[in-house]
Amino acid sequence: MKLSVGIFFGGFFAALGVLLFLVAFGTDYWLLATEIGRCSNAPEDVGGEKATFHHEGFFWRCWFSGNVGENNASMWNFWYTNQSPSKNCTHAYLSPFPLIRDEHNSTSYDSAIIYRGFWTVLMLLGVLTIVLASFFIICAAPFASHILYKAGGGFYIIAGVLFSLVVVMYVIWVQAMADLENYTNMKRMDCPDFTVYVRYGWSFMLAPIGVFFALLAGMLFLLVGRAIYLHSD
């Protein structure tokens, strides 16, 4: 394998991995949810039944109102041009829904805080690691240093592993810790026909793709470092 080819593809895959990680980290579409249901004590809506659309990411959880459509669970309902001009946002610390602490078990609430804290730390470590890996590779290129190439490759692999844990923990968070079933039952006490549609968003989907490219770039840079080391002897 020619070194120039390995370095080119390693840099290309690394750039894709960094881009996907940063987009997934910075956008608020890890989870998408649509709430539909007319409450018994609410006045009749003018212009059709209304829906509340939620989207959540690392930094923010936002929600806005809209009309009920044919495909309420579609991701296109959350596209920028389809969103309401005004929407509410709050820090995404605890849950994809605006739950009230007093209505939930305090032990579960505290456990959710701790779990979310671990997820946040892993996310930040993953972003920091992949940025540090890119720094090593940029410094390695002018000097053809096998040590820097190996260090950069190792950090790319570590970043891929960290983001893999982030994805797995988020799935567990949504399925177990967010307590969506109790939230739905609570809402149905006032809104018998209440329905919620939940799905993962494009920010979440970008993370596993970024993991693949980060791991691939890491292995390529490790091979490049080894090849440079063997040729230097």
Image: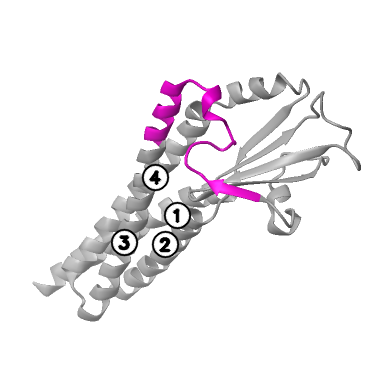
Q: Position of residue 91 (x, y in %)?
A: 51, 47
Mark before the other along the chain sequence, 4 or 3: 4
Q: Which element type, helix, strand or loop, lies under badge 1? A: helix
Q: Looking at the image, which residue is at 29% across and 74% down? A: 138
Front residue of 214 and 77? 77
Residue bearing mark 3: 220
- Verify whether residue 131 appears in magenta: no
Q: Which mark is residue 67?
A: none
Residue linked to disc 1: 210
User: Tags 4 and 3 in contact by the CB under 8 Å rule?
Assistant: no
Q: Is residue 184 above or below residue 166?
A: above
Write the start and end of the magenta stretch as one range. 88-115
Q: CA distance from mark 3 to mark 2?
A: 15 Å
Disc 4 versus disc 3: distance between alpha carbons?
A: 29 Å
Q: Nearer the viewer, mark 3 or mark 1?
A: 1
What's the distance in space between the residues labelled 2 and 4, CA to CA? 18 Å
Three-letter amino acid code at disc 1?
A: Gly
Quarter of the image containing the C terminus?
bottom left
- Which amino acid, mark 2? Val
Mark in the foreground, 2 or 4: 4
